[in-house]
Structure formats: structure tokens, C-alpha cells
Image: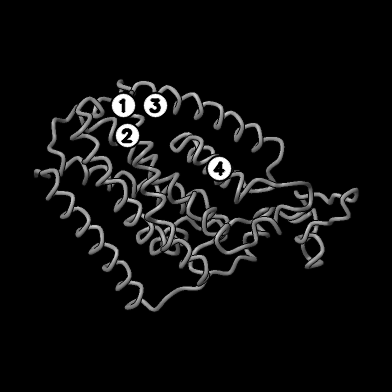
């Protein structure tokens, strides 16, 4: 039964990834980072990722992307994709390596957390989004540290229990050459994305994290539908000659006082530790 479910899952995943890549090339007026994030997330989450891509990011018709993605909950989903793509990529790479080290499952989880955090913050947030901070990489690290940390902790609050519990049921899923490994990681990524959504919604709603942005001049009008792109008509500055760098500068982010942001970071670590403790009561975690 598990084999059949995995065959269906992987078949649908291949179709989903193929479609998102094609759509990203032919129909996406978003930054290359946003497109890459969605492609990776769909690789990890299959048809479920495709469903949310169609629901929250795909341009429905020329000139309609910015209005289609304007709702706060859609902005939040798109924002979370940056975190989820980076974190899951780092975690998956680490999870492919740690079995060769012969570590206990507790140390495995720590290595995977660190790998996810490094990939999420230093690559997907700071490196790929540095144009939002005038190309200053170190500034990008500082500015994205808070949002990445609290979001990452919630992603891991979903992924760690799922990975550990499924490993106890499917011992072979620790082997990256086994199909159950990829199926387990897909399920863990889905759970992590669900758990992390509320805090990403809060971050975007309070302008503490960027959402999805239509690149100026990239979403042409659809005159046959009587519709013009909101980003072309709402502000005369947003013309086709603007660069992606100029556009991202318009997304002004707020910041919290240090004591409040620190409290949020500590709070998410507490949530993560509680979840890990509960998991350890079901399946032993060794260090």
C-alpha cells in the first residue's frame, strides 16, 4: 500500500514540477527568487504545493497578477515560500548526509536544524534578497535574521516530529537512496509549512517580512478583458523601465524593538523545545 501511494505521489510531483517550471518561464511576472522558491517547494510538496501555487501566486491573466495576489493571506503564503524553500533544502541536504555519520536521532535533528537555518538565512534570505538592502549582504543578514529565525523555528516544529515519528515507522526512510526517504521528507515539509503559516501571516501583516511582488512592467495589460495591471496604473512611478532593484526598494519593512523581537525569538524556541519534548515521549530521542 505504501509503495502504491508513493508511486502516485512521485508521479503527481513530476507533473506538478514540470508545470510550475513551464509557468515560471512563460507566465510569471515575479522575481527569479520567488520563482525558484516555488519550484523547490513544489519539488518537496508535490501536488499540494502546486495547489497553493495556483491559488496564491500564478498570474490568472495578463495584468491581473498584483490584484490576484494582493490579499494578505496570499502574500503570507508567498512570503513563507522563501523560508520553506531555503529551510527544507538545507534540512534535506543534511538529512542525506547524517546517516553516514552514525549519529543518534537527537544530534541528527540538531545538524538538520543548523543546515536549514544556514541555507534559509544566509542563502535564501540574505544572499538572494540583498537587492532589497542596496546590495549590502551583511545588512540583509541583519534585517532578515528575526523573520527567518521565528519562521524557521515553526517550520522545524512541524518537520522534526514528522521526521522522527516517520523514521520509527519506516526505518529505511533514513537512507536517501530509498524512496521512503523522499516521501518522508515531503510529508515533513508539508507539515512544517502548515505549522509555520500563522507566524508568517503575522510577519507579513505587520510589515516585518516581504510578501509577493509583481515586477513593474512585467505584467502587461489585457485590453481584451478590459483590465489593466494595478501596478502600472496605481502609481505613475511604476513604469516598465524600472528595475527589480528599484521595485524592491518600495517595499518598506518595519522592525520591532530589540527586547520584543528577542522575546518572540525565545518564545518560538520554547515552542520548538516543547514539541520536541512531546515527540520524545512517543519516540525516544537520544543524544
Q: Which residue is drawn at 58% across and 45% down?
A: 53
Q: Does the CB distance between marks 1 and 2 fall below 8 Å?
A: yes
**What kind of element bears circle 3?**
helix
**What kind of element bears circle 1?**
helix
Q: Does the CB distance between marks 1 and 3 fall below 8 Å?
A: no
The residue at which mark 4 appears reads as 51
Colour basis: one colour
The residue at which mark 3 appears reads as 5
Q: Vertically, is 173 above or below 118?
A: above
Q: Which of marks 2 and 4 is nearer the N terminus?
A: 4
Q: Does the CB distance between marks 1 and 4 fall below 8 Å?
A: no
**What kind of element bears circle 2?**
helix
Q: Residue at x 76, y 50 (%)?
A: 219
Q: Which mark is residue 24?
A: none
The residue at which mark 2 appears reads as 184
Query: In this view of the protein, which residue sits in the foreground, 14 or 86?
Result: 14
- Per the model, the C-alpha gap separating discs 1 and 3 is 11 Å
- Per the model, the C-alpha gap separating discs 1 and 4 is 23 Å
From the top left corner, tell me how far across and down residue 149 is, in percent: 35, 59
Q: Residue at x 62, y 62 (%)?
A: 71
- Per the model, the C-alpha gap separating discs 2 and 3 is 12 Å
Mark 1, Cα crowd under 10 Å, few <14 / some 14-19 / many 20+, is many
In the rendered image, the residue lying farthest to the front is 1
Mark 2, Cα crowd under 10 Å, few <14 / some 14-19 / many 20+, is many
Which quadrant would residue 284 be assigned to in this image?
A: top left
Q: Earlier in the sequence, mark 2 or mark 3?
A: 3
The residue at which mark 1 appears reads as 180
Quadrant for the C terminus, please.
top left
Amino acid at each position: 500500500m505504501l509503495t502504491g501511494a508513493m508511486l502516485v505521489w512521485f508521479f503527481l510531483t513530476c507533473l506538478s514540477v514540470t508545470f510550475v517550471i513551464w509557468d515560471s518561464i512563460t507566465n510569471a511576472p515575479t522575481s527569479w527568487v520567488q520563482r525558484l522558491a516555488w519550484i523547490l517547494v513544489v519539488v518537496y510538496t508535490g501536488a499540494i504545493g502546486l495547489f497553493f501555487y495556483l491559488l496564491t501566486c500564478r498570474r490568472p491573466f495578463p495584468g491581473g497578477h498584483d490584484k490576484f495576489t494582493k490579499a494578505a493571506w496570499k502574500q503570507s503564503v508567498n512570503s513563507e515560500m522563501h523560508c520553506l524553500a531555503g529551510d527544507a533544502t538545507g534540512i534535506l541536504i543534511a538529512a542525506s548526509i547524517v546517516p553516514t555519520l552514525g549519529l543518534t536521532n537527537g544530534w541528527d535533528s540538531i545538524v538538520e536544524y543548523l543546515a536549514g537555518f544556514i541555507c534559509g538565512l544566509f542563502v535564501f534570505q540574505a544572499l538572494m534578497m540583498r537587492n532589497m538592502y542596496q546590495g549590502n549582504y551583511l545588512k540583509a543578514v541583519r534585517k532578515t535574521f528575526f523573520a527567518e529565525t521565528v519562521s524557521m523555528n515553526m517550520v522545524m516544529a512541524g518537520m522534526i516530529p514528522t521526521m522522527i515519528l516517520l523514521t520509527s515507522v519506516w526505518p529505511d526512510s533514513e537512507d536517501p537512496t530509498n524512496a521512503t526517504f523522499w516521501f518522508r521528507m515531503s510529508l515533513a515539509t508539508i507539515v512544517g509549512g502548515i505549522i509555520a503559516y500563522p507566524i508568517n501571516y503575522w510577519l507579513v501583516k505587520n510589515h516585518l517580512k516581504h510578501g509577493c511582488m509583481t515586477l513593474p512592467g512585467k505584467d502587461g495589460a489585457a485590453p481584451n478583458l478590459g483590465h489593466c495591471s494595478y501596478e502600472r496604473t496605481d502609481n505613475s512611478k511604476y513604469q516598465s523601465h524600472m528595475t527589480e532593484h528599484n521595485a524592491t526598494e518600495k517595499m518598506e519593512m518595519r522592525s520591532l524593538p530589540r527586547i520584543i523581537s528577542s522575546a518572540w525569538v525565545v518564545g518560538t524556541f520554547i515552542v520548538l523545545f516543547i514539541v520536541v519534548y512531546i515527540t520524545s515521549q512517543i519516540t525516544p530521542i537520544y543524544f
